[in-house]
Amino acid sequence: MYKELIEAALTARENAYVPYSQFKVGSAVLTEDGQIISGCNIENASYGATNCAERTAIFNAVSQGHRHIKALAVVGDTSTFTYPCGICRQVMVEFALNKDIPIIIVKNSEEYLVKTLEDILPGAFTKSDLDAHKGEKNV
Ligand SMILES: O=c1ccn([C@H]2C[C@H](O)[C@@H](CO)O2)c(=O)[nH]1
Ligand SMILES: [Zn+2]
């Protein structure tokens, strides 16, 4: 079922720009209209400017006009499962169709785990928290 998304993440990993960590990561997202859009990690000599594969894939989708993702796959470069970092989890929440979308943690094309976004970032801070604040503010 997730085969195409996993293959897109594996292919995207080939373009990872990782001169500092040598740790290649690939990711792919499924858009609301069924497109698959991918991304890789892109490092920088100023390490903090590095962009993870998951955010590259999401930002790539958003910059092509998509506002909601229905699923995301991520694959690292080891014999273990690579989970998304905290910043990427928060960015996923911003653009996910809902908190139950599948996040597919891939080891290789045969071995993967399927979690939900709520599983990996329970009780996330969202736009609705800001909306609640606006409604309650009395200055
Ligand atoms: O889920 C992850 C975890 C790490 N990285 C990248 C960031 C950096 O380039 C390298 C090492 O942290 O891996 C990702 O792209 N996604
Ligand atoms: Zn990340």
Image (spheres, helix red, strand yellow):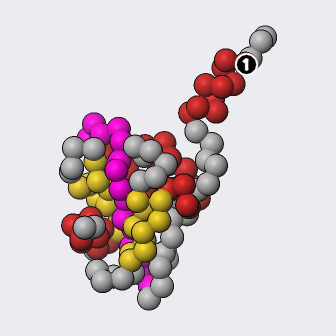
Judged from the image, the secondary structure of the residue bearing numbered disc 1 is: helix
25 vs 60: above or below? below
User: Residue 107 appears at what percent x and percent y?
Assistant: 39, 81
User: Residue 45 appears at what percent x and percent y?
Assistant: 50, 64
Q: CB of residue at label 1: within 8 Å of ligand 2?
A: no
Residue nearest the viewer, comparing 19 with 113 = 113
**Which quarter shows the C terminus?**
top right
4 vs 30: above or below? below
Q: Name the residue located 67 percent from the left edge and 17 percent from the top edge.
A: 135
**Which quarter shows the N terminus?**
bottom left
Can residue 17 be seen here? The reply is: no
Mark 1 sits on what residue? 136
User: Residue 6 appears at what percent x and percent y?
Assistant: 29, 70
Q: How many marks?
A: 1
Instruction: Look at label 1 and name its amino acid.
Output: Glu
What range of the chain is rendered magenta?
A: 64-78
Residue nearest the viewer, comparing 46 with 118 = 118
Residue nearest the viewer, comparing 64 with 102 = 102
Q: Is 22 colored magenta in this rendering?
A: no
Residue that lies at the very extreme toward the right in this rendered image? 139
Q: Is 74 colored magenta in this rendering?
A: yes
Q: Name the residue located 63 percent from the left edge and 29 percent from the top edge.
A: 130
Q: Is 45 left or right of 61, judged from the image as shown?
A: right
Q: Is 101 left or right of 29, judged from the image as shown?
A: right
Q: Name the residue located 63 percent from the left edge and 42 percent from the top edge.
A: 125
Q: Name the residue located 58 percent from the left edge and 56 percent from the top edge.
A: 121
Can residue 80 be seen here? The reply is: yes
